[in-house]
Amino acid sequence: MCASPLAPNAPPVKCEPPEFRTLYRLNARLALRLEETLYLCVLRARDSEAADALERHLRTHLCAGELYCQMQPGVIYLQVFAKSEERAQVLLCDATDCVPGVTAQLKPVPKGE
């Protein structure tokens, strides 16, 4: 099971799909309490070379405790807490600008009624 590291300079957390899904549901509830929005980001690499470069980029540029998961070859999901879409978009722009052949999308997790 993946657990969030406590050290401030620790790498982000790579989860397996079942763990990522469980933490996604828990983080959606946490986002409501924090009055922030949880964004689900999908990054796609056009080939295996771009996929490897994307994973290296995420390991070195995401913050400690941020969660990501390789759902299938070349497709990585990322959970991002942010006050606005523009702030969440910064991470995606960084990845797409630094890693050729990567595209990214994000969507906010719907808030409960």
Image (tube, helix red, strand yellow):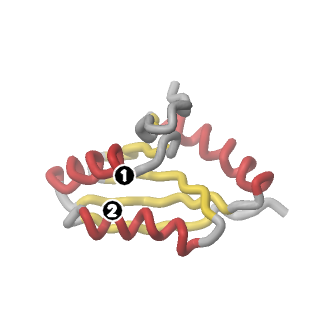
x and y percentages locating residue 73 in the rendered image: 28, 47
Q: Is residue 40 visible?
A: yes
Q: What residue occupies the far right of the structure in this picture?
A: 113
What element does badge 1 sit on?
Answer: helix
Query: Which disc is residue 61 wearing?
Result: 1
x and y percentages locating residue 90 in the rendered image: 45, 68
x and y percentages locating residue 34 in the rendered image: 76, 54
Would you say the residues marked 2 and 1 are in contact, meaning their CB atoms lie under 8 Å apart?
A: yes
- Residue ID at (61%, 62%): 82
Q: In this view, does 95 lie above or below 77?
A: below
What element does badge 2 sit on?
Answer: helix
Residue identifier under label 2: 95
Q: In which quarter of the image is residue 44?
A: bottom left
Q: What residue occupies the far left of the structure in this picture?
A: 49
x and y percentages locating residue 51 in the rendered image: 23, 52
- Residue ID at (41%, 38%): 11
In-image side of 48 versus 5 (left or right): left
- Residue ID at (26%, 59%): 45
| Amino acid type at image mark 1 | His
| Amino acid type at image mark 2 | Ala
Query: Which disc is residue 82 wearing?
Result: none
Front-most of residues 13 and 24:
13
In-image side of 35 versus 69 (left or right): right
**Mark 1 closeness class: few <14, some 14–19, many ≥20 residues within 10 Å:** some
Quarter containing the C terminus = bottom right
Q: In which quarter of the image is residue 102?
A: bottom left
Q: What residue occupies the far top of the structure in this picture?
A: 1
The earlier-in-sequence mark between 2 and 1 is 1
Q: Is residue 25 above or below residue 88?
A: above
In-image side of 26 versus 52 (left or right): right
Q: Is residue 14 visible?
A: no
Q: In this view, does 78 lie above or below 11?
A: below
